[in-house]
Structure formats: structure tokens, C-alpha cells
Image (spheres, rainbow, N blue to C red):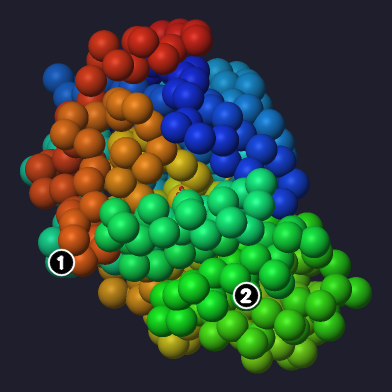
Amino acid sequence: MKIDDITLFHVKLPYLAPFQTSRWVENDHECLLVRLRAAGLTAWGECVAGAQPGYSYETTKTNWHILEDFIIPSVLAASLDDVPAYRDAVEPVMGHNMAKAGLEMALWDLFAQRDGLSLQQALGGAGDRVRVGVSVGIQPTVDRLLEVVEGYLGQGYGRVKLKIKPGRDVAETAAVRRAHPDLLLQVDGNSVYRIGDAAHLAELDDFGLLLIEQPLAHDDIVDHAKLQAALKTAICLDESITSAEHARWALELKACRVINIKPGRVSGLHEGRRIHDLCYQAGIPVWMGGMLETGIGRASNVALASLPGFRLPGDISASARYYHEDVIDPPFVLNPDSTVSVPTAPGLGVKVRPEVVARYTLAQKNYSA
Ligand code: SMG
Ligand code: MG
């Protein structure tokens, strides 16, 4: 299949509220949207890197560079009939998984539309809804945190993740647990702690958490293995797992008991599904992470999250948790049972609103062969 043209949109959507993690804060969702046209079809993808290299080394600008200078030329020069062919085409590019994944998402959308399949069907998922939760950034005070959590519970979210950092962890988690004894609760350190913090992190064992996400450095599965041995609570790796190989290494080292899958982090849905399959075989639960995506990336996450190994609720919230308006219509909404419905139309199954994309576009460029 020949791709007619590819357009990159660098968009910036303001968040309803700043999102603070252990190491950086974001006020807007900056990302690249990828639009691809072929055989009369229009397909979309989203690169999840943000403006700052806080979560990973990738940013919107590195995504643009890698796509413009390497990936787009090879895609336009090739004739691609399936995702594995695309993966072969980008194999010479080391790393830059989020850049690769954004275009891969658009190709999944394209090929699924061509085949008359929903993305869920193309990926082999099942069910009409996926279980979701909400991720709560670090708040100015414990009282404010309790208020924010209350607000989300009032909206129907049944699982809460708290961002934590040194000095803003045990007391905060204890307060939320005291207020909500039965809540499905987990925490995320975003790579800020070190193995010397093991005794301190073990205090979190008292709170019946589902998991502690990525406490130690992004490139350190060795100390994660030592930490996991010292904790009762399951460690879940996020930043550390960038491929199915990393997932296997982490499991062999017993560096975690749960894995968070973000297609962007692992170079796309194809690799995300491989990690799912590996974990499923090994009896390791996985769950869908989130990068505060627009409705485009969210649709992709929801479809993958309908595979059977996604046994814990995902960081997939309603569009209204993040944005004044989403780039898709209708937006994603939260069902009363703390789920989000899986789109059923061909491809991503969502309708992109070009006028909304245009409203938030800082730069765009079209590429054709
Ligand atoms: O709801 O999409 C969401 C946010 C989920 O907390 C979330 N993601 O490390 O898991 C994580 C963070 C990364 C966010 S970086 C912008
Ligand atoms: Mg995380």
C-alpha cells in the first residue's frame, strides 16, 4: 500500500489543572499528531512525548526530528502492507520509541480501516469496555489531595493512583488510605527514589496498595530486583520497560511483579502486545498506562487494554479529566462502573475534529513522496 501523504501537527492543549510528578510539572499536553492518507482513507496517530524530557529523553521536538529526517522518508519510499513491514523499515533507527509508535498507531488505524476491522478486533481484544482509574498529581497540601481524590471518586473512578516523591509520600498515602479504606490505590514514584530509600519505601507496605510504580531509576532493573525482595507490595515497572526484551529481563531478575504497558514507551502497539503476551504466559498482570493522551491516543490505548492480560484498571480517564475539549467527537466518557467503552467503528473508531486540531496547532507540515 502506497502512502499518499503524511502530516505532522505539533499541538498544545492546556490541561484543566497542572499535572505534577516527582520530577517535573506539566501545564499543557504538547504532542505530535500524525495524519496519514492512503487509498482514500485518513488515519491518525499520536506521539506521546511531551515538551520536556521528564518522563523520557524524547520530546515533541525530537519526535519531529526523527520522523521528518528518518522515519517519514523511509515510509514514503516504501510500500507497506502491514505493521511488521513498518517495523522492518524503522529498525535502523535506534531508540526514539515514541516517534516510531506515533506513526505506527496511524498505520494500525489505516490497515484496520482497510480491513473493515475495529482496532480492538485487529489487535485481538474482546469486550465492550475496559476498567479504568485516575492518576492524581502531587497536590500542594494533604487536604487538597483528599479533596481532589474525593472529587474523582464522586465522578465514579474506582481506582486511584497517587504521584509521590520524597517528603510527599508516606503521609499522603496514609491520609488517602485512612479516608478510603477499601479504595483500589497505588502510587507512582516516576524514577525518583534510590535503593537507599528501601526502608522508607517499605513503610508503604502498610497501606494495602495494588502496586508501587517505578520507584527507582528508569535504567535500573538491578536495584528494583533488590527492592522488590525487600517489599511486600508489588513493584510495577513503567519507565524501565521499553521492549519485550526488557520485560523478559525484568521478570527473570524478579525486578517487578506487575508491568505497565504504554504503547508509546515501547515503540508501538505491536511491541505492547508482545509484552502483554509474554506477561500473560508468565501469569504477570499488566495494565494500560497513560500519557494524558488526546482522544486519538486514548482510542488506541483503550483497544489494546481490551486484551485479556490487562487485569488491573488502566490510567485511561475520560476526556473531561484532562481537557476543556478533546480533538475527537464524541469524547471518551466514564461509565458508572469505572470503565470506558471500547470504540467499535473501523480503525481507531473515533471521529477527529479538524477544527479543534487546528485550534491547538503550533506548527504543521505535510510530506509526500
Ligand atoms: O491519565 O494519562 C494519564 C496520566 C497517567 O500518571 C500517568 N502517567 O508515569 O505513569 C506515569 C505518568 C506519566 C505522565 S508523563 C506526562
Ligand atoms: Mg508511571
What's the residue at 67%, 60% (across, down)? 164
For label 1, the crowd category at 10 Å Cα-Cα, with few meaning under 14, some 14 to 19 and many 20 or more, is few
Q: Which of the 4 image quarters holds residue 131?
A: bottom left
For label 2, the crowd category at 10 Å Cα-Cα, with few meaning under 14, some 14 to 19 and many 20 or more, is some
Can residue 95 be spotted in the picture?
A: no
Q: Is residue 15 left or right of residue 187?
A: left
- Residue labelled with disc 1: 127
Pick whichever, 181 or 355, lies toward us: 181
Q: Point out residue 151 in the picture as x, y percentages from the top left corner.
A: 39, 53
Q: Point out residue 128 in the picture as x, y percentages from the top left corner.
A: 13, 61
Q: Is residue 67 left or right of residue 292?
A: right
Q: Is residue 366 above or below residue 92?
A: above
- Residue labelled with disc 2: 174
Pick whichever, 347 or 83, lies toward us: 347
Q: Is mark 2 within 8 Å of ligand 1?
A: no
Q: Point out residue 19 in the picture as x, y percentages from the top left corner.
A: 57, 41
| Tag 2 secondary structure | helix
Q: Is residue 345 above or below residue 47?
A: below
What's the residue at 41%, 38% (across, down)? 322
Q: Is residue 138 left or right of residue 182?
A: right
What's the residue at 10%, 43% (across, down)? 345
| Tag 1 secondary structure | loop
Report the amino acid beneath label 1. Gly
Report the amino acid beneath label 2. Ala
